[in-house]
Amino acid sequence: MNSPDVAAASRTAVDGYFQPDADPGDIKAFYAANGFLVMERAFDPDQVKALRLEATDICRGRRGAIKNAERLSDDLSDPEVLRRFLCIHFPHKASEVVRETLFNSATLKVLTSVIGPNVKCMQSMLFIKSAGKPGQAWHQDEDYIPTRDRSLTGGWIALDDATVENGCLWVIPGSHRPGVLWEQEWHGDRRFDCSDESVGFPYRDEDAIPVEVSAGSVVFFNGYLLHRSLPNTAPEGTYRRALVNHFMSCESHLAWGPQPDGVSSAKWDSRDVVVVAGQDPYAHRGYAEEHEVILRPDGRSGCLDWGASDQRVYRDE
Ligand SMILES: O=C(O)CCC(=O)C(=O)O
C-alpha cells in the first residue's frame, strides 16, 4: 500500500475513494452502482488514537463485563490482552467514545446520501484481529440483520491502515444489485471464523477487489454486498483494528434479535436502536436494551454456541 497521503492524492471519486467535502450526489451515484465506497479522513489521527486506547480498555473489561470473555488479570500487557480478542459486539453500549462515532459528520453525510434523511444504528462491532487471527468468509450482512427496504449499511472505521497483508475487506463491486440473499453453508476453512459462507452466487473470487484504506477512513457497504476478509498475515505484534457500525433507515422495521412472544413477524420491530439522523416515525414506541456487549468466538470451540446447528468439521480434519 502507498503511504496514506500519496494514496489519497492519487485517487479520484471514480475508484470509490471520497473526501469529506465530496458532493453528496457523487457519493450516492457511486454507492448505488457499486454497493460500497470509502470516505477518507473521516476521523483525524487524534480520534483514531483515542479509539485504539478505548479498544484496549474495552478488552480489559474497564468499560464493563463482556459476555463470554474471561476475566483478565491486570498484570497482562496490552499485547497479551489484545491477542485474545477477535471481535466484540455492541461496544457502543459500553463506551461513550465508541458511541460518539455514530455521529461523526463525514459518516452522517454518507449515510444521509445513501440511505435517506432518517437513519438509525442497531449494531456495532469492534474487530481487533491481531496477527494470525482469521477473516470472515463471503457473506451479506442482510442475512443477519434484515431490513424491509434493503437499507442496511455498514460503516467500517479503520483504526489501523488496512492492507491485503493484515486482512482488509474485500468486496465484489455491484454484487448488491440483484437483491438476492444467496444460500449459506459451513465453509470448513480455517482462514475464516465461525460465520457461514454465502455460496451459489454468479461471481468469481477474481471479481473481488481489496479495499485497502488508511486509518481514519470509513468503508461503507450495502447489506446485500458480498464481502469477506482474509486472515491477518502481518507480523506478530501488529493488529488490524476496525470499528464497524451498522445503520438503516428509520422507516424500516427491524426484525432482529429476540422476537417478542405473541408479536407477528410483520409487527416485529426491535427498538434497541440509536437514531443518528433525522426523525424516527416510530419514536412513540420508545427504545429498549435487548443486546449486551458480547465476545464473538473466532474458532471451532465457540462455533456451536454461535448458532451452528450441525457438526462443524474443517476440511483438513
Ligand atoms: O472486519 C472484518 O474482518 C469483517 C467485517 C465484516 O465482514 C462485516 O462487518 O460485515
Image (tube, grey):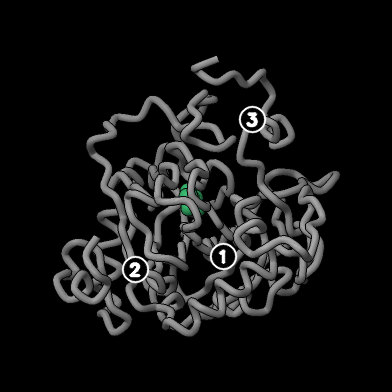
Q: Position of residue 16 (x, y in %)?
A: 24, 63
Q: Looking at the figure, which quarter contains the C terminus?
A: top right
In the image, what residue type sits under mark 2? Ser
Choose the circle earlier in sequence order: 2 or 1. 2
Instruction: Find disc 3 in the rendering and name its residue.
Output: 300
Q: Residue at x 47, y 43 (%)?
A: 135
In the image, what residue type sits under mark 1? Glu
Q: CA distance from mark 2 to mark 3?
A: 31 Å
In the image, what residue type sits under mark 3? Arg
In this view, the residue in front, 281 or 21, is 21
In this view, the residue in front, 232 or 10, is 232
Q: Quadrant of residue 262?
A: top right
Q: Looking at the figure, which quarter contains the N terminus?
A: bottom left
Q: Is residue 215 visible?
A: yes
Q: Position of residue 108 (x, y in %)?
A: 45, 77
Q: Residue at x 37, y 59 (%)?
A: 162
The local crowd at label 3, few if under 14, some if 14 to 19, many if 20 or more residues have their Cα within 10 Å, is some
Q: Is residue 187 above or below residue 271?
A: above
Q: Residue at x 33, y 57 (%)?
A: 36
In this view, the residue in front, 201 or 283, is 201
Residue 251: which numbered mark, if any? 1
Instruction: Find disc 2 in the rendering and name its residue.
Output: 214
Q: Is residue 197 above or below residue 131?
A: above
Choose the circle earlier in sequence order: 2 or 3. 2
